Image: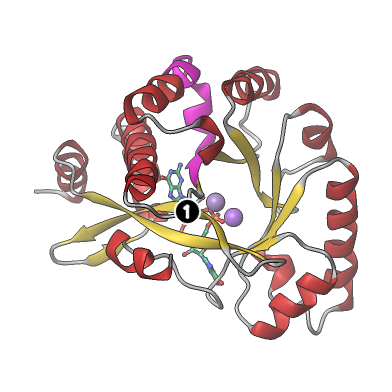
Amino acid sequence: LTFEQELRHAIENNQLELYYQPQISLCSQKIVGVEALIRWNHPTFGLINPGDIIPLAEELGLADTLGEWVLQKACHQSKDWQNHGFTPIKVAVNLSPQDFLQHALVERVKQVLIETNLEPQYLEIEITESMTMDVDHAITTMQALHELGVQIAIDDFGKGYSSLNYLKNFPIDHLKIDRSFVNDILNDHNDVKIISAIISLAHGLNLKVIAEGVETKEQALFLSNLHCDQAQGYYYSKPLPVNEIEKLF
Ligand code: G
Ligand code: G
Ligand code: MN
Ligand code: NA
């Protein structure tokens, strides 16, 4: 089989997995959410990351199938944790700009919430801005998602194409600061200025801020002092399979 055929087979036969990375409140130090990240545990190549899965799935015309699977899996998992008595936390799912072009997206999300019986406030959609995104269409879609009660996060904020236009027009709940600004926060004064400005901007607009790529205790403390709301990164945990993340709850 070619790699393409193997991926098709894996998608169609439920052989992909979701890993989960915790999102921690800097105030309470508690886990307030998890981000679902797709993985493919390949029999010979080992663990394959989204960067090698998503573009290929798009080429194969399987982006929709995959997107729907991720939503379904993540919502089902979140409800399952609630049913096992864990404190309800939000599950964040990444959608690609391509997912956003799907006319049926809102209907699909609605359907998945009904099927899994997950309360909409426990689902968050993470969207990365991109040059190819049809902004008017994205706004309409996000508003419809927001009306369902689903939360919206802007991913990788500050990197690439993110613009203030999004903050003005999108119904957003969370801004995720790209890890390139967090990496060097203890040494680079410019990064500190940028992060502080993003945090005050976000708070002025009633949005919460999540710092990505937090790798040390010192970075976490520093971000906490800047009034950043939440943090995610290797300091707390790398993305983990279900049975391992449950141990952190
Ligand atoms: O887990 P990792 O660091 O390799 O993730 C890399 C990127 O892949 C992240 O930016 C994330 O947004 C994206 N990604 C992870 N899982 C999914 C998914 O299920 N769907 C989409 N569209 N992107 C994902
Ligand atoms: O683009 P998105 O933010 O959705 O991607 C998250 C990706 O970042 C995941 O692939 C995850 O493996 C990776 N990641 C998560 N935490 C850290 C971290 O602390 N440092 C680095 N370098 N990467 C991280
Ligand atoms: Mn993300
Ligand atoms: Na990100």
Q: Is residue 57 left or right of residue 14?
A: right
Q: Is residue 227 left or right of residue 147?
A: right
Residue at horizontal 27 percent and vertical 52 percent from the top: 17
Which quadrant holds residue 31? bottom right
Q: Which residue is nearer to you in this view: 81 or 174?
A: 81
Residue 131 lies within the magenta run: no
Q: Nearer the viewer, residue 108 or 100?
A: 108
The magenta-colored residue range is 91-107
Could you tell me residue 27's position as x and y percent?
Answer: 72, 66
Furthest-left residue in this view: 1
The residue at the point 78 percent across, 83 percent down is 186
Vertical placement of 138 versus 224: above or below? above
The amino acid type of the residue labelled 1 equals: Thr
Q: Taking 186 as reference, is 59 above or below it?
A: above
Which color scheme does this rendered protein use? secondary structure
The residue sitting at the front extreme is 85
Q: Residues within 10 Å of mark 1 (few under 14, many from 20)?
A: few
Is 162 positioned to the left or the right of 18 in the image?
A: right
Give the secondary structure at mark 1.
loop
Is 218 situated above or below 3? below
Residue under circle 1? 87
At x 56%, y 69%, the residue is 233
Left or right of 45: which side holds 170?
right
Identified at 39% across, 45% down, the residue is 78
User: Quadrant location of the C terminus?
Assistant: bottom left
**Residue 202 image position (x, y, % from top left):** 83, 48
Residue 4: which quarter of the image? top left
Q: Position of residue 135 (x, y in %)?
A: 69, 25
Is residue 104 a member of the stretch shown in magenta?
Answer: yes
Figure quarter occupied by ligand 4:
bottom right
Q: Position of residue 237 (x, y in %)?
A: 48, 73
Compared with residue 143, is residue 159 higher up or lower down, i.e. above or below? below
